């Protein structure tokens, strides 16, 4: 394979970019000349570069210490580039890792398949630094932003867990609400993006309780009107905390409206009927179900049947969505039922 090596040309603005020193790039290609050329070009721009001559060697690095960008050959001696890409995308730790596929003689089917598997970009061989470096820079910056975003989201999840943990009775509440909500949404055929928004909303729904003091949050006796007022602000406080994050935009209605009732008797806005979106109805039902079936500071846990009885009555009163409750009941029952054995099917 011939490669156009133009590294000897001095490039204006070819100095190392500040983010380059923070970034590790992995080149997975069985052709040593391609690896050497990429290494030379990228190292000159300030990146640190690792090489892997086989799919398995590349995946070993990606699994143990994921780089910030991968150049991946389509045809490797031991596995196809497609299958490497598939593994990268199926691992939560590397699902956002930018992968640039190196293509020499790739057919359009190969490219379509790579797109379907979530390739970030293609780079046709032979290549020159002029096309390589600007693309690498934008991909590396994207990865740094994605890392920052994941870090911020991780911090909020930790914060949500911390709030649950303040009250020993509600430890794990947000995670369970997210799990119930997701089970219901899957039964209702939600798409992947909406599922993610729903899950986030459920995880963060009580984030605003951070502003409620322990004296009120953990009070065993009945609350005064003033104390109830403080607690009832948590949907608004949670929304205000998350609002500056752009990626939380679709999550905000869930946080703000999770105490609304379909007849308009909920808080904080007294929304009703169609003004309460389906995602909110699902989280609300999951929230109420978990609250009833776990021990609280003011009462013992109810059995599942007793909780359903109360919630069915509340559906009749016009508070909750009856279809969502039925889906929750079916989802919980399904989760409890062990899958049928093959022998019993045949
Ligand atoms: Fe709440
Ligand atoms: Fe809650």
Image: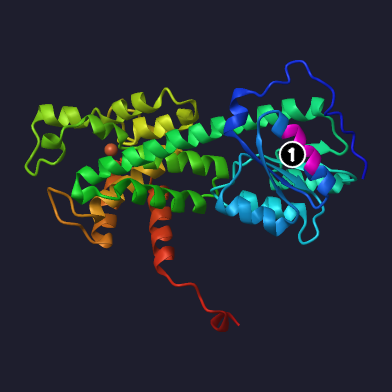
On the question of residue 188 being in view, the answer is: yes
Q: Residues within 10 Å of mark 1 (few under 14, many from 20)?
A: many
Image vertical order of residue 87 relative to residue 216, above or below: below
Residue 159 lies left or right of residue 153; in this view the side is left
Quarter of the picture containing the C terminus is bottom right
Q: Nearer the viewer, residue 172 or 223?
A: 172
Residue 248 drawn at (x, y percent): 46, 30
Label 1 secondary element: helix
270 and 338: which is toward the camera: 338
The x and y percentages for residue 18 are 59, 23
Majority secondary structure in the magenta region:
helix
From this viewpoint, is residue 265 visible?
no
Would you identify the image quadrant in which residue 102 lies? top right
> Residue 126's quadrant in the figure?
top right
Which span of residues is magenta-colored?
A: 36-42
Which residue is identified by label 1?
39
Tell me if residue 50 is in the magenta stretch. Answer: no
Please tell me which residue is depicted at 55% across the width and 30% down the height of the picture: 145
The structure residue drawn at horizontal position 75% and vertical position 54%, both measured from the top left corner, is 53
């Amino acid at each position: 394979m011939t490669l156009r090596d133009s590294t000897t040309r001095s490039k204006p603005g070819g100095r190392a970019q500040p983010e380059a020193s923070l970034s590790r790039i992995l080149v997975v290609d069985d052709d040593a000349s391609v690896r050497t050329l990429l290494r030379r070009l990228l190292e000159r721009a300030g990146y640190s570069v690792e090489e892997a001559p086989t799919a398995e060697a590349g995946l070993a690095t990606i699994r143990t210490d994921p780089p910030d960008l991968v150049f991946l050959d389509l045809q490797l001696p031991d596995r196809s580039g497609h299958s490497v890409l598939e593994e990268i995308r199926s691992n939560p730790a590397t699902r956002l890792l930018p992968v640039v596929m190196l293509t020499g003689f790739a057919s359009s089917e190969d490219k379509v398949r790579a797109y379907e598997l979530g390739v970030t970009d293609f780079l046709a061989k032979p290549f020159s630094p002029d096309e390589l470096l600007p693309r690498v820079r934008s991909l590396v910056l994207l990865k740094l932003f994605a890392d920052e975003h994941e870090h911020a989201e991780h911090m909020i999840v930790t914060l949500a867990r911390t709030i649950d943990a303040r009250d020993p009775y509600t430890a794990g509440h947000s995670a369970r609400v997210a799990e119930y909500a997701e089970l219901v949404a899957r039964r209702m055929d939600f798409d992947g993006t909406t599922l993610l928004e729903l899950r986030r909303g459920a995880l963060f729904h009580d984030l605003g309780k951070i502003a409620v003091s322990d004296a009120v949050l953990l009070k065993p006796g009945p609350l005064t009107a003033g104390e109830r007022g403080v607690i009832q602000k948590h949907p608004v406080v949670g929304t205000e905390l998350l609002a500056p994050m752009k990626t939380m935009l679709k999550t905000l209605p869930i946080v703000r409206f999770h105490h609304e009732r379909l007849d308009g008797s909920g808080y904080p806005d007294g929304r009703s009927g169609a003004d309460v979106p389906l995602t909110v109805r699902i989280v609300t039902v999951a929230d109420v179900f978990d609250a009833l079936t776990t021990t609280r500071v003011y009462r013992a846990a109810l059995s599942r049947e007793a909780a359903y009885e109360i919630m069915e009555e509340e559906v009749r009163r016009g508070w909750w969505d009856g279809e969502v409750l039925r889906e929750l009941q079916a989802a919980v029952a399904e989760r409890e039922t062990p899958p049928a054995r093959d022998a019993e099917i045949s």
